[in-house]
Amino acid sequence: MIGLTNITKAYGETKALQAVNLAFGAGKTTALIGPSGFGKSTLLRVIIGLIRPDSGSVTFKEREVAPQDWLSLRQKMGYVIQEGGLFPHLRASDNVTLMARYLSWDRERITQRLYDLAALTRLSPQILDRFPAELSGGQRQRVSLMRALMLDPDVLLLDEPLGALDPLTRVDLQSDLRQIFRQLRKTVVLVTHNLGEAAFFGDLVVLLRDGLVVQSGTLDELIQTPVDPFVTHFINAQRSPLDRHAPSRPGQAGGKNKNQHRPGRATVIIH
Amino acid sequence: MVFILLVPLGLGPFSFPARASLSEVTVGSKKFTESVILGELVAGLVRHGGYPARHRKELGGTRVLWNALLRGEIDVYPEYTGTLAEEIFARKGLRDEAEIRRILARQGLAMTAALGFNNNYALGMRRETCRKLDLHRISDLLKHPGLNFGFSNEFLARSDGWPGLRARYGLPQTNVFGLEHELAYRGVATGAIDATDLYTTDAEIAYHDLCVLEDDQRYFPVYAAVLIYRQDLEKRAPGVVAALAGLGGTIKAGDMIRMNERAKVEKVPEGDVAADFLKERLSLKTASPVETVAAQVWQRTREHLSLVTLALLAAIIMAVPLGIAAERLPRLGQFILGGAGVIQTIPSLALLVFMIPFLGIGGLPAVVALFLYGLLPIIRNTYTGLRDIPPPVRESAAALGLPPGARLRLVELPLAAPAILAGIKTSAVITVGTATLGAIIGAGGYGQPILTGIRLDDLGLILQGAVPSAVLALLVQGAFELLERVIVPQGLRLKHVI
């Protein structure tokens, strides 16, 4: 669905991306993971054309994207960021439908889509009348997701969508999100610094450091055949203290050495 | 650019025509009482001759009147030969009346015979001070370098005023400052200043019992009162020129002092003073149009509102796009914000007078000056309002696929609306206040009674301008607060905005 070829981007001395080559397959969920400030968000912005790379090219459905294509292409991509990025002057419903109204969809179609999405994201329709300032963090993310899905895009890009939420809200939204991804079969690219989250969502995990792709593959591949000591180091650093102290998991207590263990899906939450 | 903008805005309903009809005669006068009385005299004569007359009184100083006459915005105004020779044609070194007439004719102007009195400059002091220091002549001032002088601003600056006087007599005083002529009298009377410049026909000389120092070196030129007018006046209103000529030699110094005294001390309206003179001396029956206070206040309110509304509308139309441009294009932005800032530093009075050579007198130059003043708060607030939009919100709008124009209209401007509106409010309140200065260049409004009130030392008149102006400023402020509820999106008025 999306291909990145030789993407390079520098901010002054800092190299955010260095010759990145990646492909995101249709219907697959890919998690971009790595330490904070190492080009993950930049990569997402390159995909949606908010940032022009210094060199390299982006392809969408096998066709190279030209600068004038971005505006129409963005209608085929949904974008959700950490704090939701909702427009504070618009009610939740107007946030969701802004683009559809701009494209002059008829009213019925808009209303229908709005309620379908509310059901999908499990948001009570009354909440849609509120302004962003009146919403909880979780509700904001759900509205933001609705907005991203409004035009039924092929691609969904999420930049730390759960980053600003408290743990309990996070669990709820996390499982809802995965449910939605599976149901809709969108091409999803998700940025996170949390390995558990990456494992929970991603068919594929891409580990980035210093603007370079260190390794990409399934989490099992990363754990079992790390190409670089950093991979192992990063994975270990992310192990939950609960993992280490859980008595029912033999081999975990001193688990620095072997790393054979695959993080359980139930333990990905707290970080 | 500004002027092009103002024209399609339709000065129509708010128009300030320089001349209402071909045969109407427009009389001008300077902003001191004697000039206003002479203007009323001329207006009375014109009306007696069967033509409608319009008296644009209190039009600032010599330059304002002179330029207005050259541009044909006024047809006639009272002037003094000394001012013509020493000020208007200062560099030409004119020696006599014939030369003045010749040079006037070259510009399409003419001058009547002298009206009969001179209004020379002189220096005046409190009689008590004169007696104590034994002062009789200007030369006597040499012995008292510690005295302080407060001169009218025009006298302080004119080549035939203080600079020349100081050079001729070698006066040593350094404590010299400028103030309004009308205020200078009060300053001398209360002892705040020791000496000021006088006009010899001023009623205040007798009223405050001042002593006049003799100009023993014959420094001050003779200021014989005359009327200067446009030569085309004869064609447009036949007979008027002859009637004006008839005024020659009829007003003696004593008459003028008496008329000044009636207007300034006895508070008789200048129109009545002039009408009485025409009746008693020339046996002409004239009636000056009478207006009630309410009608006057209403008229001024309309003028003031027109000035403010037009200037503000133009400022909004211009400043919001400039603010947007400043935010979009940082390099141009520095230029725009800098330019608007520089305009703001020009004193409002200077800006108003600066407009005259380009736009003449009246409403238009005042509107343009007020417009220029109104720009900065709106530009700056538009700029900051847009700049302060959180980057995630801005980015989200772009990520939706909205083109830049739609982003601006649907997201960015609504978010910046509170700031922009606050800028417009600031601008409106400032404009209401600054518009009172417009009266000096003939724009009318609440400044007119303030100007007259200062001239006549009449607190009541000053309040007739100052109070409605303050009330209007409060109303404007209130109106904008109401407007805020309509314009500022509800979501932004909630307390916990992201």
Image (cartoon, coloured by chain):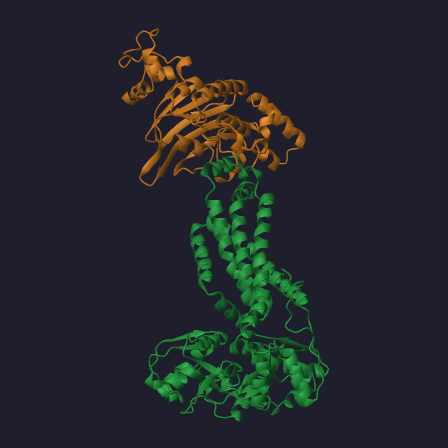
Chain colours: A orange, B green
Q: How many marks?
A: 0
Reply above or below: B255 against B483: below
The image quarter containing residue A111 is top right
At x 36% / y 16%, what residue is drawn?
Answer: A221
Quick one: A8 or B35, which is closer to the camera?
B35
Tell me where residue B34 sits by quadrant: bottom right
Q: Looking at the picture, does residue A240 appear above or below residue B432?
A: above
Residue A7: name its quadrant.
top left
Q: Which residue is most to the right? A: B50
Q: Position of residue B414 (x, y in %)?
A: 55, 43
Residue located 69% across and 73% down the image:
B290
x and y, in percent, of residue A48 in the image? 47, 33
- The quarter of the rendered structure image containing the N terminus of chain B is bottom right
- What residue is shown at x 51% (from left), y 51% (from top)? B423
Specify whether A97 is left or right of B183: right
Q: Is residue B69 visible?
A: no
Between B325 and A22, the residue placed more toward the observer is: B325
Q: Is residue B475 above or below residue B495?
A: below
Residue at 40 percent across and 85 percent down: it is B130
Q: Is residue B103 left or right of residue A213?
A: right
Residue B88 drawn at (x, y percent):
50, 82
